Image (cartoon, grey):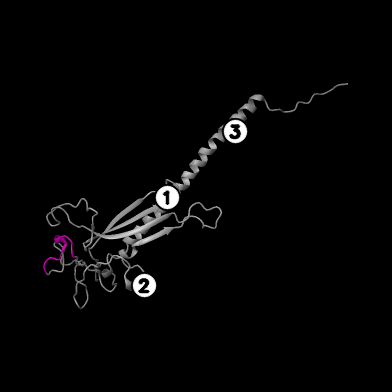
Amino acid sequence: MIYSKKFRPAVAMVELIFAIVIMGIAMMSAPLLISTAGKGSTVAIQQEGINEASTRMAIIMSYAWDENDTDEMYIPPILHVTNGHTDLDESGDSERRVGTPDASQRTFLISDSNSSELNASTLLAMDSNDNNEEDDIDDFVGSISLTLVGSSTDTDYIEKDTINIKTEISYISDNVDGGYSNGHTINFIPFQANAATTNIKEITVTLTSTSDIEELNKTIVLRAFSCNIGGYKLEEKVF
């Protein structure tokens, strides 16, 4: 009688050791991978807030410089201010600044039948006659909260209303050492708040957070400025 031996596949000791080592490495790497993923989510949340602030800044900059520049029937005039640099004031009765060509539409004069001139407004906030609709840059003063994920009733939400975006508008000094009319180059305009009206408004958008996450609990500030230069009209050529 002949007996046949059947060999069954088995796991060699070396293979088992390798499997255990690989599993150990994977288990040791798991906390690091989880931590990295968490940091990635935090950075994404923070970047979302910065993107929202940048978008808000761009929207604000697209609006009229002042409430008195919002009448669409006329080309926005240059507005008179109370504490601006004298080189930026009207030159005599020319209705223009020094160096402005006669053909330029950038004047202090409103192009209406009354030939009137206007002052920059002192109120840097939503005006009572705006009906809560923004029409110039200082109407955006205030704070908004950025809702990121879910609501307080969700079981899987991470962060909610942790990022606050605050917008501030203020007049800042338009003084330049040496003056504007003496051939000096303007390299930097210092951001110094000014209570009186000037020819420059500073726009500040600040991001803050009440989150317990250290990476999110930072203050990020974006700044820009807008100038009192009036509007213009493209010349139409008649054939």
Residue at (50% x, 43% y) in the render: 37
* SS at circle 3: helix
Q: Earlier in the sequence, mark 1 or mark 2?
A: 1
Quick one: 212 or 86, which is closer to the camera? 212
Expressed as whole percent of the image width and height from the top left, the position of residue 184 reads: 14, 52
The answer to whether residue 216 is left or right of residue 180 is right
**Mark 1 in CB contact with mark 2 (< 8 angstroms):** no
Q: Which residues are magenta?
A: 82-92
- Which residue is disc 2 drawn over? 131
Q: Is residue 193 above or below residue 110?
A: above
* Residue at 21 percent of width and 69 percent of height: 119
Examine the structure image and report whether residue 45 is included in the region drawn in magenta.
no
Q: Amino acid at mark 2?
A: Asn
> Is 232 in front, or is 191?
191
Residue picked out by circle 1:
46
Q: Position of residue 213 (x, y in %)?
A: 45, 47
Closer to the eye: label 2 or 3: 2
Majority secondary structure of the magenta segment? loop
Q: Residue at x 62, y 27 (%)?
A: 17
Q: Which numbered disc covers residue 127?
A: none
Residue 23's tag is 3
Q: Place residue 180 in its image quadrant.
A: bottom left
- Spatial CA distance of label 1 from label 2 is 33 Å
- 3D distance between C-alphas at marks 2 and 3: 65 Å
Of label 2 and label 3, which has the lower sequence position? 3
